[in-house]
Image: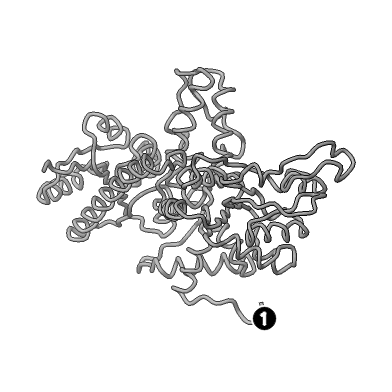
């Protein structure tokens, strides 16, 4: 088996020589570079399996190199080295896509273990991608782009659910791809050759929704000049996708419950029910549990719909997918609008990585298409980006953490940071997680880790 190649990037020549000798003793092939710019030149000539880079260097920093690698070589594992081991820098590096972070002076044994784990992780990711490609060919989920663990977990559940006739409830923020996932489930079910019918419960006026959903008979109301089949009948033997189910009026929720329980509907103005055979997939961006508590959604209907719940993660919780999505949408838009020579420079990548994407994947797709359509020259520039994307996060130095001469506990800094964020947000976990750019689950894990509890009376 050929030696694994490591691209070693450090402006300190003596340290670079020592590390090169240690890495070669461990059996790695090493490509040394004295700067990030030199490393980028080596990238194409000697493609590495892993990049081991210093953070603070003249010219491009290690974090800036990492941002470019995420675009140019997303499959390469990256470990950053620094003598300035703050928790903020570690968090920034991990969020930007680094596998791990190691502080100088570097322990030979620690580095050996870290490199081994990083390469094992890289191999696992590559294996997952290969498996994903095989699954996509077999199950047709290829339209859903990304390899974040949270997304792959949902896709795995969806693939297993597709073979049944159980109702599915897809929950997720606007723009996360709920209809795309619903279509994938249908296309991999036994009903794939039958109709897939969609109705958006929030886009149709309340007084027309019942007729659109269940149909009506001639003369049942003013303007009903003929019999009309509803969406449910049109989906007979296939799949009915109820988008924005949280917008369905209470009186229709009862009729939908009857459809699920008894497999029959009653048209507006009809005197007898009609038997139908449909599989129901529902989706919503709303919190149905909260709506149940408020009396706005039936609890019995919720449990009938959520036999198989699928929770699509927002894009800000799968930042490792942004680079792949960006390249996909850019290539798609260039082809659509016939601009094959248009370029998207790698230095703009951090602007996409650091944005919170409230509109999720749909917003990313729309912005990329807008950039392709409106770009003046053959290269997209910083000035072309929307104002929200041009804004950068404050530099790490702005956090002003004093480093005492006797040393500092990284865990103590992290605990204090989380405590201060919780106090700033009045112990609202959702707001604090957003402030720290963490998922709520990640915040709760850290609160439990450090024994942080909301004070009584707050």
Q: Is residue 433 above or below residue 330?
A: below
Rendered-image quadrant of the N terminus: top left
Residue at the right extreme of this rendering: 222
Element at label 1: loop
Q: Residue at x 66, y 47 (%)?
A: 232
The image's colour scheme reads one colour
Position of residue 241 measured from the top left corner of the image (x, y, whole percent): 61, 47
**Residue 415 left/right relative to 376:** left
Mark 1 Cα shell of 10 Å, populated few (<14), some (14-19), many (≥20): few
Rendered-image quadrant of the C terminus: bottom right
Position of residue 396 measured from the top left corner of the image (x, y, whole percent): 47, 51
Total residue callouts: 1
Closer to the camera in the image, 316 or 280 = 280
Position of residue 8 measured from the top left corner of the image (x, y, whole percent): 23, 42
Residue under circle 1?
Answer: 457
Q: Which quadrant would residue 454 be assigned to in this image?
A: bottom right
**Residue 159 left/right relative to 232:** left
Q: Residue at x 58, y 67 (%)?
A: 422
Q: Residue at x 19, y 41 (%)?
A: 5
Position of residue 15 measured from the top left corner of the image (x, y, whole percent): 20, 48
Closer to the camera in the image, 321 or 116 = 321
Q: Which quadrant would residue 376 be assigned to in this image?
A: top right
Residue at the front extreme of this rendering: 272
Closer to the camera in the image, 118 or 289 = 289
Q: Residue at x 51, y 58 (%)?
A: 438
């Amino acid at each position: 088996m050929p030696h694994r190649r490591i691209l070693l990037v450090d402006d300190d020549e003596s340290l670079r020589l020592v590390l090169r000798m240690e890495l070669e003793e461990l059996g790695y092939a090493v490509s040394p570079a004295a700067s990030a710019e030199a490393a980028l030149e080596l990238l194409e000539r000697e493609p590495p399996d892993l990049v081991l880079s210093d953070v603070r260097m003249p010219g491009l920093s290690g974090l800036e190199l990492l941002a470019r690698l995420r675009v140019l070589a997303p499959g390469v594992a990256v470990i950053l080295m620094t003598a300035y081991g703050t928790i903020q820098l570690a968090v920034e590096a991990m969020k930007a896509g680094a596998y791990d972070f190691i502080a100088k002076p570097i322990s030979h044994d620690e580095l050996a273990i870290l490199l081994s784990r990083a390469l094992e992780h890289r191999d696992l990711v590559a294996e997952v991608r290969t498996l994903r490609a095989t699954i996509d060919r077999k199950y047709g989920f290829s339209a859903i782009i990304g390899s974040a663990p949270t997304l792959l977990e949902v896709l795995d559940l969806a693939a297993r659910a597709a073979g049944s006739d159980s109702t599915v409830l897809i929950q997720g923020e606007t723009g996360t791809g709920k209809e795309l996932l619903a279509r994938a489930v249908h296309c991999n079910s036994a009903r794939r050759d039958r109709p897939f019918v969609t109705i958006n419960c929030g886009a149709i006026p309340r007084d027309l929704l019942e007729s659109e959903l269940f149909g009506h008979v001639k003369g049942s109301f003013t303007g009903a000049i003929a019999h009309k089949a509803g969406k449910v009948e049109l989906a007979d033997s296939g799949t009915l996708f109820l988008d924005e189910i949280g917008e369905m009026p209470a009186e229709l929720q009862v009729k939908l419950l009857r459809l699920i329980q008894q497999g029959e509907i009653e048209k507006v103005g009809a005197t007898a029910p009609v038997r139908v055979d449909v599989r129901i997939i529902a989706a919503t961006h709303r919190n149905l549990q909260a709506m149940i508590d408020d009396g706005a959604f039936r609890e019995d209907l919720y449990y009938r719909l959520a036999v198989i719940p699928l929770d699509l993660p927002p894009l800000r919780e799968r930042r490792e997918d942004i680079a792949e999505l960006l390249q996909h949408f850019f290539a798609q838009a260039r082809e659509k609008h016939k601009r094959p020579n248009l370029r998207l420079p790698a230095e703009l990548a951090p602007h996409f990585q650091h944005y919170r994407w409230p509109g999720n994947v749909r917003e990313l797709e729309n912005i990329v298409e807008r950039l392709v359509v409106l770009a003046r020259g053959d290269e997209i520039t910083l000035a072309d980006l929307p104002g929200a994307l041009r804004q950068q996060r404050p530099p790490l130095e702005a956090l002003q953490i004093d480093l005492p001469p006797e040393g500092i506990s990284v865990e103590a800094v992290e605990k204090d940071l989380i405590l201060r964020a919780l106090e700033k947000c009045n112990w609202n976990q959702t707001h604090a997680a957003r402030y720290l750019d963490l998922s709520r689950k990640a915040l709760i894990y850290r609160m439990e880790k450090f024994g942080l509890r909301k004070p009584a009376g707050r």
